[in-house]
Image (spheres, grey):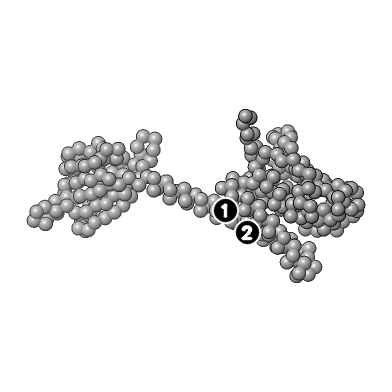
Amino acid sequence: MSVFAQDLELRYSWVANSRNSWLCNAGDGMCDADILPQTAAERASEMKRQVLLKQQPLRYEMSVAQGSQLRWYDICLDVDRDETGEACGIIGTSFDITDQKRREETLKTLLRELSHRSKNLLAIIQSLASQTARHSLTVPEFLVRFRGRIQSLSSSQDIVTDADWRGADLESLVTTQVERYAPDGMDQIDFRPIGVYLSPTASLHVGLALHELAVNAASYGSLSVPGGKVVIDAAFQRGESENVLVIDWREINGPRVRAERDARFGTSTLERIVPNAVGGEAHLEYRPEGIRYTLTVPEAQYEVMPRPAEA
């Protein structure tokens, strides 16, 4: 904290502990215009004139560019009086609050990001409710399907939050979204992990796609019968203009699949909602040996995890 005094003409009479502050160049007889940029000097002088006019203390914040940095100061002003009690100038303190200001700005940024992500999540939930209701014949059917999809979003969101909003790794998404629907757990899931982090948006939607596929497989497909399996492959490929991540879901050893299927929300999610959300492409096939689903995720929606250093 720096302490300073100025006379009635707002010329500095003394300054204490001014090192590394905006007052470091203040000398006897100088005014604010001699040590501050014009705008800051005019504001500082106006604040001090108000103190002298109203005979009341005043507090304000001031920013000053020092080198390549912008530093903030908390300025407290009061009337300086002589031995007779008459006003003889200004007495003031200056405290560096730059770190506090940076924390406040970081908090504001985080709150704006939280608001943005919350709105996105609410939009997804609204879409889920609308689409689920459109393809549900009864209220109990709607509740069962809607709860499952909300739980899917919640599980993916937990992974994203635990990773400090960086996203979610594909292996965690497969484990949380698919394993619980397999009677024999991961023994029925043939998945070779790949080092990739999906963005928060991609994490929620890829998780939702895996949920839809897993529920369908557990109800009608390869996870509904003993010996049935799901093969999930993931690989990086070179697209037309950028690298892409290709996620491939294949069901084997399950009931024979008929090509003619009624359009359901699961199909809409897999073929339209998920690829549109991540800016990629998707292809769903009803093969006799089982469903196959391929999703292409553009490079902007994932991050390749660095390989661990070899011993």
Q: What is the quadrant of the C terminus in the image?
A: top right
Q: Local crowd at mark 2 within 10 Å, few (<14), some, or many (≥20)?
A: few
Q: Does residue 32 sit above or below 140 in this rendering?
A: above
Q: Report x, y in % for residue 290.
A: 86, 49
Q: Residue at x 8, y 56 (%)?
A: 84
Q: Decide if residue 244 is on the left or right side of residue 259.
A: left
Residue matched to label 2: 122
Q: Amino acid at mark 2?
A: Leu
Label 1: state its secondary structure. Answer: helix
Q: Report x, y in % for residue 191.
A: 76, 43
Q: Quadrant of residue 78?
A: bottom left
Q: Amino acid at mark 1?
A: His
Is residue 266 visible to the viewer in this orientation of the structure? no
Give the mark, 1 or 2, whose residue is nearer the N terminus.
1
Q: What is the quadrant of the N terminus in the image?
A: top left
Q: Report x, y in % for residue 308.
A: 63, 34
Q: Decide if residue 255 is on the left or right side of residue 147.
A: right
Is residue 148 visible to the viewer in this orientation of the structure? yes
Give the Cα separation between the discs numbered 1 and 2. 10 Å
Label 2: state its secondary structure. Answer: helix
- Between 279 and 231, the one lying in front of the other is 231
Q: Residue at x 91, y 52 (%)?
A: 256
Q: Residue at x 82, y 58 (%)?
A: 219
* Residue with the most extreme top position: 311
Q: Residue at x 30, y 47 (%)?
A: 95
Residue matched to label 1: 116
Q: Quadrant of residue 196?
A: top right
